[in-house]
Image (spheres, helix red, strand yellow):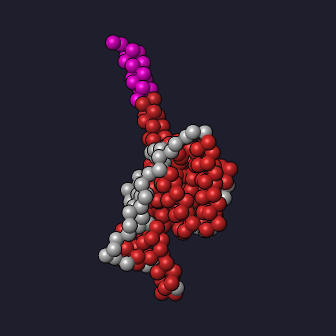
């Protein structure tokens, strides 16, 4: 083989590896979140936005992707802790409409399991404190605890005990929903940063986080995605 043939072969091999790398990158980008997880992103985001028309589409997509009725109910219930009762209740009403429409079409979606009873040997605050500590990786600290003990009690007993203590939605799914809702809202970057950390603590990968932001960009808006990406990069840098 002469030098010209060798050079051509080297170029061909380099191109082959380049195409493989591109394909692998695209696979990682599209498969970092499963279709069910991507549906959690849009359901939470449009609930936070109060965009009920787009939420209706997202709810149908979620059921088609395999989310159970009770899993979606759980997401919408959890959303009230981050988006307020009005948006959560509006989202639940929209879900009722979706279920009625699907029923009339003869679609039968999986109900899924109900949450187990909370442990009887622990108080709500004890359970919530354990869950909160596990999620953030250390006992909670902050000036708000001494300044307003009531909010600390509500966070531990209600948010992390009553809500996160329900076992029909895993922590990763709950964090995907929370991050997606916060990423779709303005003025909550401190909380978004905290929950990106929690998401990584419960085993979501950086690729999954970026995939989540890609869904936000394509379905919600570039402004929201750019802000979320900047916060995520700050978190990744801080974690080393």
The image quadrant where one finds the N terminus is top left
Dominant SS of magenta comes to helix
Residue 215 higher or lower than 11, as above or below = below
Instruction: Tell me residue 224's x, y (percent).
Output: 62, 56
Which residue occupies 64% across, 51% down? 97
Q: Is residue 58 magenta?
A: no
Q: Is residue 16 magenta?
A: yes
- Asked whether residue 52 is in view, the answer is yes
Which residue occupies 48% across, 71% down? 159
Which residue occupies 33% across, 74% down? 120
In this rendering, would 120 be left or right of 227? left
The image quadrant where one finds the C terminus is bottom left
Instruction: Tell me residue 42's x, y (percent).
Output: 57, 51
Of the pair 98 and 87, the residue shown nearer to us: 98
Residue range highlighted in magenta:
1-17
Instruction: Tell me residue 178's x, y (percent).
Output: 52, 61
């Amino acid at each position: 083989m002469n030098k010209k043939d060798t050079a051509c072969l080297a170029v061909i091999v380099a191109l082959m590896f380049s195409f493989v790398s591109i394909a692998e990158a695209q696979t990682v980008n599209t498969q970092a979140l499963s279709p069910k997880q991507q549906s959690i992103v849009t359901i939470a985001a449009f609930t936070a936005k109060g965009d009920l028309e787009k939420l209706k589409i997202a709810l149908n997509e979620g059921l088609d992707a395999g989310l159970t009725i009770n899993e979606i109910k759980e997401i919408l219930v959890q959303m009230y802790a981050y988006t307020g009762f009005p948006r959560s209740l509006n989202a639940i009403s929209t879900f009722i409409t979706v279920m009625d429409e699907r029923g009339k079409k003869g679609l039968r979606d999986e109900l899924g399991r109900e949450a187990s009873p909370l442990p009887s040997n622990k108080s709500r605050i004890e359970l919530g404190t354990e869950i909160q500590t596990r999620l953030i990786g250390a006992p909670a600290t902050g000036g708000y605890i001494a300044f307003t003990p009531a909010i600390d009690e509500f966070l531990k007993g209600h948010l992390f005990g009553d809500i996160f203590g329900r076992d029909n939605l895993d922590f990763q799914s709950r964090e995907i929903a929370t991050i997606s809702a916060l990423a779709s809202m303005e003025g909550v970057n401190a909380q978004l940063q905290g929950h990106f950390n929690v998401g990584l603590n419960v085993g979501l990968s950086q690729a999954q986080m970026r995939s989540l932001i890609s869904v936000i960009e394509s379905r919600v808006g570039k402004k929201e995605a750019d802000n979320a990406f900047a916060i995520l990069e700050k978190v990744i840098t801080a974690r080393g």
